[in-house]
Image (tube, rainbow, N blue to C red):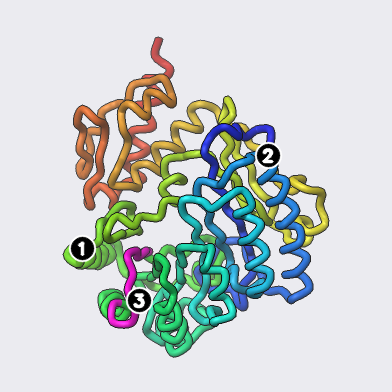
Amino acid sequence: MLSSFDNRKETSLYIHIPFCSAKCDYCAFYSLVSNKETFDKYTEKLLKEIDVASSYFKKPWKTVFIGGGNPGMVGPKNLLKIVNAIVRNGKPDEFSIEMNPETLTKEYFPIFEIVDRLSMGVQSLKETSLTFLGRNSSVKQTLDGIKLSSQLKIEKSYDLITCLPGENTTLGDIKMLENLTDFNHLSVYALTPEKHTPMWLRKDSLPDNDTQYDQLMEIWTALENRGFSHYEVSNFARNGRVCLHNCRYWQLQQYIGLGSAACSTSLNGNAVRWNGIHSVSDYIHGDLFSTYEREDLSKMNEIEEYILVSLRTKRGIKKKEFYDRFQIDLPVLDYTGFINDNTGITVTDKGLMISDSAALKLIVKTEKKLRSP
C-alpha cells in the first residue's frame, strides 16, 4: 500500500475513529458503539500503522484530520497517544479533530497543545430537532460543550444541520453560537437522508426542493453578511480560516487514511484509491496495512472525481492546473451559476446549488475531448 504513494509529495493524513455513544438516525458513516477494551486495541493498532507510515514519508504531514464517529470516545489518554505519534516528524500546517459537544471535558485539553483546530458537531440547538435527528445529546449538554470549547485558544468550527421539518431555526442557532464563543468557521449541511439509515427507512416528510433552496439562500446570505466567505457548498470561513485539510480533498491531492473504513488517494503515477474495510475487529486483528482494498483509477475516473469535488467549491477549476494534471484543455461550462474566464471556471452561490448536474455536463464534454483524435 505505502509504495503506491509518492513520498516526495506533500501528503495529508486522515485517521478514522469509528466509535459513537449511539448511532444518529441520519448517519451513514461507518461507526459503532463499543467498549474500553476495543478502544485500547484499536488505538494500539493505529499507533503501529502511524509509526510505519511516518517512517515511509519521513517528513511532517501537510494537514491532519482525526474524524469519526466521535474520536473522543477512545478517551483522552488514547487520543493523546495518537496525536503525539502523528507529530513524530513535526507539526502539520493544520491539525484538526472532530468531537461531539457532550464528550468534551477539560481532560482533553492537553491534546489541544498540539491540535490547533476543533470541529464540533452541534447540528441543532433545538431539543425537538436533536430528538428528530436521533442525537444522543440534549440542548443543555450541547451548550455546555460549546461553552467549554470557548476556553480553547485554537481555531474552532461548528457543524449545523438545516432543512429540517417545521420552522427553520438555523439562523437562531448561529446567533446563539455567536453569543457563546468566537469562531471563524461554520459548516451548514442540508439534511439528506442516506439510504438504509433509520431516517431514510422512516420516510420522514422534509421540506420540498423550493423550500430548501429558499432556506439555504437565506442562511448563505446571512453568513456572508456576517463576514463569512462561502468557499464550499456547505462550508463558510471568516478571516481566511478555511479548512486546509478539506481543501486538499476538494483538489484531489494525495492523502493517506488509516483505520477501519478510512480511505486514501495515492498519486505515484496512476491514481489509486485505498478503501478500508468496514470491520473494527478485522482491522484490529489484521496485519499492518492489510485491511485496505485497492482500486486503480483510470484517467477518466480521476478527471470525473476532480470535476465533481472542484465544482463544489467557489474556487472551481483552474485551467492551468487542469491541463498540468491531465494534459487536456478544460472545456467551457455554459451553465447558469458558473463563470468562464481566462483562468478557468469559478462558481457562484447559484452554481453551488446545482454543482452535481453541472459537473456531469462538464464530465461529458471532457470525455468527448479526451476521446477525440
In the rendered image, the quadrant that contains the N terminus is top right
Visible residue check, residue 331: yes
Q: Real-space Cα distance between discs 1 and 2?
A: 42 Å
Q: Position of residue 40 (x, y in %)?
A: 75, 69
Residue 371, picture quadrant: top left
Q: Secondary structure at mark 1?
A: loop
Q: Is residue 199 above or below residue 145?
A: above
Judging by the rendered image, the residue that carries numbered circle 1 is 227
Q: Is residue 184 magenta?
A: yes
Q: Position of residue 296 (x, y in %)?
A: 62, 32
Residue range corresponding to the magenta coloring: 178-189
Tag 1: Cα neighbours inside 10 Å, few (<14), some, or many (≥20)? Answer: few
Q: Nearer the viewer, mark 1 or mark 2?
A: 2
Q: Position of residue 104 (x, y in %)?
A: 53, 79
Q: Nearer the viewer, residue 103 or 312?
A: 103
Tag 3: Cα neighbours inside 10 Å, few (<14), some, or many (≥20)? Answer: some
- The reply to whether the C-beta atoms of the residues labelled 3 and 1 are less than 8 Å apart is no
Q: Nearer the viewer, residue 44 or 262?
A: 44
Q: Is residue 74 above or below residue 116?
A: below
The answer to whether 50 appears left or right of 71 in the picture is right
Q: Nearer the viewer, mark 2 or mark 3?
A: 2
Labelled disc at residue 56: 2
- Going from N to C along the chain, the mark reached first, 2 or 3, is 2
Q: Is residue 150 above or below residue 10?
A: below
Q: Nearer the viewer, residue 119 or 50?
A: 50
Task: Identify the residue at image location x=26%, y=78%.
Answer: 175
